[in-house]
Amino acid sequence: MDNNLTPEKPYVIGLDMGGTNSVFGIVDSRGTIKAQTVISTKAYPDVKDYVKAAVEALQPCLDMIGGIQNVRGMGIGAPDGNYYTGNIEHAVNLVWKGIIPIAKLFSEALGIPVRITNDANAAAMGEMAYGVARGMNNFIMITLGTGVGSGIVCDGKIVYGSDGFAGELGHVIVDYTPEARPCGCGRKGCLETYCSATGVARTARQFLQKSVKPSLLRELNPEEITSYDVFCAAEKGDEIAKEIFEFTGYTLGAACANFANFNSPEAFVFFGGLTKAGHWIMDPITRAYNENVLSLYKGKAKLLVSSLEGSEAAVLGASALGWE
C-alpha cells in the first residue's frame, strides 16, 4: 500500500436552512445521518454570529466522526440560494436581507469547500443521490409545502440557468382569468397558489363558499382550515374535501404534462406534506397527466412519491452537494 495515498474523506455536512431553524447533519456516502444538530436561524440578526453559533453546535457532531479532517465538504439548501455565487440573494423569509455570502463564511469558518443551492434543488439532489431517483439522469422534483418548489434534472445535472435561479415551476402561471389568485411573487395565477398546502386551504374556502353541500369542513373556522383538515375530511368520505383534492391534483397533473416537454423526464418525484394525502392527490395527478401529456411522452414518465423521510430529506439533499 502506498502510504502517500490518503483515504477518501468519508463524510459531508448537510445544512437545511429554514426561516425559523437550521438543521445540520453529518452524512456518510450511503446517505446515513450519523449525527444531527439544530440551531435557531432567526435568533442571529448578524449572519457572522449565526455562523459562529453553527460551528460551535457542530463541534460535538464532528467529534463523533473524528473531526473536521474527515469531512469532504458541506452543502447548504437555503431559500434563494444561488449555486453559482454561493450567496443567498434577497430571501424574503430569512432574518438577513440583501446578498449574504453564506458559502464563503462557512468555508472560512470550517476550512472545507462549501456549496449552496435552493431548497427544492437540494431535495432533487438528495433524491438523485439517495432516493427513488437514484440512477436517473432526467427527472423533475416537485416539492409541495407552503409553496410549490421544483428541481429539474437534465442529463444528470440540476438546471440552474444563466443566473442560478432556473426551474421555478411553482411560478408558472396556470390561470390567466381575471379571478386568478394573487401570488406572493407579485403575479397572479401561479401554480403554487393552487397546488401548495396553502393553495389547498384557499381552495377549501372557495369551494365552501360556492357550494351548499354539507361538509365536515363547515364545522371549522374557514380561516384556520389546513390541507390536513381537508385530508381528514376526505378520509371520512366528505364530498367537498374529495372535490378539493380532485381540483388540486388535476391542476398539478396537467401542469406536469406541460413540464414533460422540458426534458422528457424518466419520472416526476413529488415530495412534501401534501403527498401524505396519498391516493386523494396522486390519482387526479396521474389522470390529468395521462390525459394532457403530448403523445410523444405518453407512458414514459413514472409519477413517484419521494422515498426519503421528510425530516431527513432536506439535510440529505443539501449534503449531496458536499460530495461534488
Image: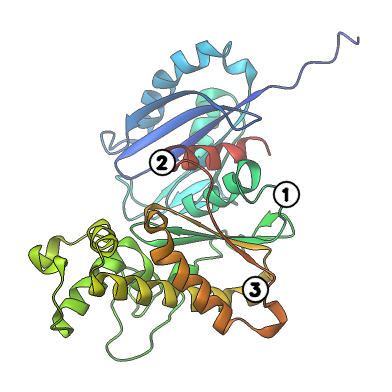
Asked whether, in this view, residue 323 is left or right of residue 211, the answer is right
Q: Position of residue 253 (x, y in %)?
A: 49, 74
Callout in the foreground (3, 2): 3
Q: Nearer the viewer, residue 162 or 241?
A: 241
Q: Residue farthest to the right?
A: 1
Instruction: Count every numbered label the image shows and give the total.
Output: 3
Q: Residue farthest to the front?
A: 237
Q: Is residue 280 above or below residue 106?
A: below
* Colour mapping used in the image: rainbow
Which badge, 2 or 1, is on the more N-terminal residue?
A: 2
Q: Position of residue 308 (x, y in %)?
A: 52, 43
Secondary element type, mark 3: helix
Q: Crowding near pointer 3: few (<14 within 10 Å), some, many (20+)?
A: few
Which badge, 3 or 2, is on the more N-terminal residue?
A: 2
Label 2 amino acid? Met
Q: Crowding near pointer 2: few (<14 within 10 Å), some, many (20+)?
A: many
Q: Which mark is residue 262?
A: 3
Find disc 2 in the rendering and name its residue: 17
Q: Nearer the viewer, residue 195 or 79?
A: 195
Label 1 amino acid? Gly
